[in-house]
Image: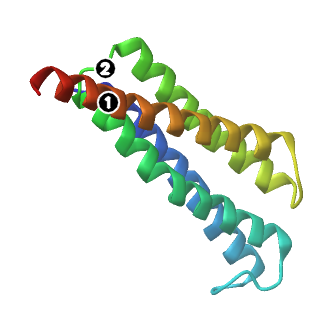
Amino acid sequence: MHISGCYVALSALLALVLAGRVSWLRNKRKVMLGDGGIPELARAIRAHANAAEYLPIGLLLLLLLDLDQTRPGLLHLCGVALVAGRVLHAWGLSRHAGPSFGRAAGIVLTWGVMLVMALLLLWQFLLVHSVTA
C-alpha cells in the first residue's frame, strides 16, 4: 500500500464529516436546497465545498510523489500538512464568517504544501529528464 493511501482515507473521512454536518444542519433547519439565508449552514456548505476544491489536487500531487518513490518521511510531512490544513480551515470557517486563525493557518498550510509538492514534482521531473537527455 502506498503512503498516500493513508491520507486519501483521512481526507475521505474529513469530507464525510463535513458533508454530514451540512446534512444535519439542513435537516435541523428544514432547508433542502441552498443555505436558506442561515449563516451557520452557509459556512458549513463552504467548509465542505472548500475541502472538495482543494483535496483532489493536493492528494493527486501526494500520490504522484508517492509513485515517484519520494522519501517516506517527506510524504508523511506533506500528507499531514495537507490534512491538517483542511481540518484547520474547516474548523475556522465553521466557527467564524470572517477572518480566523483556523482559516488563515489552514490556507497557509494547504497552499504551502501544494506549492512544495508541485515544485518537488517538477524538480524530480527535471532531474530525470536532464539525466536522460
The colour scheme used to paint the residues is: rainbow
Identify the residue shown where x is 72% and y is 69%.
25
The residues bearing labels 1 and 2 have C-alpha atoms spaced at a distance of 6 Å
Q: Amino acid at mark 2?
A: Thr
Task: Give the residue drawn at x 72%, y 84%.
Answer: 30
Q: Quick one: SS at disc 1?
A: helix
| Residue 129 drawn at (x, y percent) | 18, 29
Horizontal side, residue 66 vs residue 88: left or right: left
Residues packed near mark 2 inside 10 Å, few (<14), some (14 to 19) or many (20 plus): some
Residue appearing at x 53%, y 53% in the figure: 54
Which percent across, then down, holds residue 38? Answer: 83, 78
Expressed as whole percent of the image width and height from the top left, the position of residue 82 reads 54, 36
* Callout 1 touching callout 2 (CB < 8 Å): yes
Name the residue type under label 1. Leu
Q: Nearer the viewer, residue 5 or 31?
A: 5
Q: How many marks?
A: 2
Q: Name the residue at 57% across, 29% down.
A: 81
Residue with the mark numbered 2: 70
Q: Which residue position is annotated with label 1?
A: 65
111 versus 131 height, above or below: below
Q: Quadrant of residue 71?
A: top left
Question: In the rendered view of the protein, which quadrant contains the N terminus?
Answer: top left
Q: Vertical placement of 119 versus 102: above or below?
A: above
Q: Quadrant of the C terminus?
A: top left
Q: Nearer the viewer, residue 54 or 21?
A: 54
Disc 2 element: loop
Q: Of 46 and 16, which appears nearest the observer?
A: 46
